[in-house]
Image (cartoon, grey):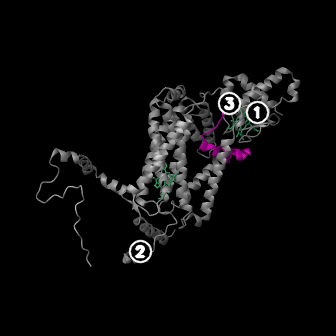
Amino acid sequence: MPKLKLPVPPMPGRPAPKRPGKTYGPQTPREHGREAGTSAIGWIDERTSLSGGARWMMFRKVPKGTNWFYTLGSATMFAFLAQAVTGVFLAMYYDPSATGAYDSIRNINNEVFLGEFVHGMHKWGSSVMVILVFLHMGRTFFFGAYKYPRELNWVIGVVLLILTMTMSFTGYLLPFDQRSYWATIVGVNINGTGPFVGPYLSDFLRAGPDFGATTLSRFYAIHMMLVPGAIAALMGFHLYLVAKLGTTAPPWLRAKSPEKLREEKVAR
Amino acid sequence: MNKQQKEQYLREYGILKAEGKPFFPYAVAKDSLMAAIVLVVIIVMSIVLGAELGPKADPTTTTYTPRPEWYFFFLFELLRVIKPPELVPLATIGIPTIGMILLFLLPFYDRGPERRPERRPIATLTGIFVVVAMGYLTYLGASAESPTTISIDPPANVVAQGDKAVATFNSGAQVVAQAGCAACHKLGHSGNDGPGPELTDIGRRLPRQAIERTLINPTAPMPSFAQLQQDAPQQFDEMVTFLAELK
Ligand code: HEM
């Protein structure tokens, strides 16, 4: 039987649909004002066609059964963004030289408005981000989310994990107090024992065979430009794949067999 | 997974996805709430725990404890658990490297179609074992404080050489204690047993020159103390004398 389609009644609060023959678009200044947001977006979209992508990202479906464990990935991303924002403010006052680094951090802690607060957010935010990365990895591991077709997303995730650990390793030296100085020396030495690339890696990190004045600025450049750039790029790719492939359903959920589905439809 | 299993998975996933809800606003709402929790946790930690700064880095002074950030403790503890020196490179780099390679290649060697954790006992148990082991090593690392004093009585032959020798011995012990050697070496009853070998009777095993050479040009992960020798030769000398007398 062909379905009968009734005209949809006008929603309350909405202007009645225009009659044919009338001029379209906003007429009075008030109408123009009301439409400003839409028309600005329309202007951009006419030139970029970005709205399709945004719709694809936002209005995709997430499978049945998606629970709180699935928020860990985006929580990691949020922690990264928080690190980026607080890091920018620290960089405004930080001096990456062996002579000035310690004093500039002390200045941040003692003099700058809310300095110690932002420094503390950056410092503890790193711990929070590391914990969240591990929890997110645990979720994808125990849910078997690394299996077909999401293998590549797992591999990108492992690179993101290594980069996150690199961030905390290079950031640890920057306050340049005793703890961070000696711990980093030991860390770089441990790197040096690695197979094949080990010695080159520790030479690269130290900027030479010895721990010298350029080591600190090298760590700073790695910490605030090289690795964050790589993380942001890979995160974008990670998220693209998440949207493209969809997030997994919880592994214990089974789709009803098509027959059952059909029966339900018939009964309804 | 063979071709049929892949198609089966995609079909089933397609149904589950069609039964689901749109990402916006349902998942976005959960994600935003989680983000707010993360932000509050970071802010509270910053206010409660602060951002204290230790004393300024100084390559010449010798009071330091080589302690990494807490989430690297498990790597550091691995060094302590694996004692024999010929296995140290294995612990420092071998196990982490193998672990990373296994993690990287996981989707390529675990290709079964089963996803439920309780039906993949090997993967699930291995995962739980790794989590517990890392947690335990982190706990060990957090509770291992490195001592800054060393109490070793001067041996009889030092006492026999008179008061001056005893004084040198004691100040050497102090330099060693302040240099943080005990973070990696056991000396008498003080210090951590590993990753470095026990130094209680180092003078019997190594001659003075060899000890000096080790301090200036050590094998990783031990840091070099060449800077100390340049800047404070007397302290360095006392330290070597002290170590050479430990028999
Ligand atoms: C900087 C760190 C990371 C960020 C920002 C991030 C972000 C995300 C987000 C937002 C999702 C969507 C689903 C969810 O939230 O659970 C996701 C999914 C996924 N992530 Fe990550 N991730 C990171 C690190 C990792 C790591 C270390 C791994 C594993 C080694 C990994 C593997 C995966 C996999 C396999 C999925 C697909 C899960 C599914 O479809 O159910 N990610 N990631």
Q: CA distance from mark 3 to mark 1?
A: 14 Å
Given residues A250 and B89, the one toward you in this image is: A250
Q: Please provide the residue range marked out in magenta.
A: B63-91
Pinpoint residue B110: horizontal percent, then vertical percent. 56, 63
Quarter that holds the N terminus of chain A? bottom left
User: Hey, which quadrant is residue B49 in on the image?
Assistant: top right
Label 2 neighbourhood size at 10 Å, few (<14), some (14-19), many (20+)? few
Labels 2 and 1 in the same subunit: no
> What residue is disc 1 on?
B210
Quarter that holds the C terminus of chain A? bottom left
Residue A14 in the figure: left or right of residue A232: left
Give the vertical position of B159 relative to B69 (above or below). Answer: above
The amino acid on which the numbered mark 1 sits, given as a three-letter code, is Ala
Pinpoint residue A207: horizontal percent, then vertical percent. 55, 34
- Give the prevailing secondary structure in the magenta stretch: helix
The amino acid on which the numbered mark 2 sits, given as a three-letter code, is Leu
Nearer the camera: disc 3 or disc 1:
3
Residue A195 in the figure: left or right of residue A144: right
Residue A204 visible in the shown view: no
> What residue is disc 2 on?
A261
> What residue is disc 3 on?
B225
Q: Chain of mark 2?
A: A
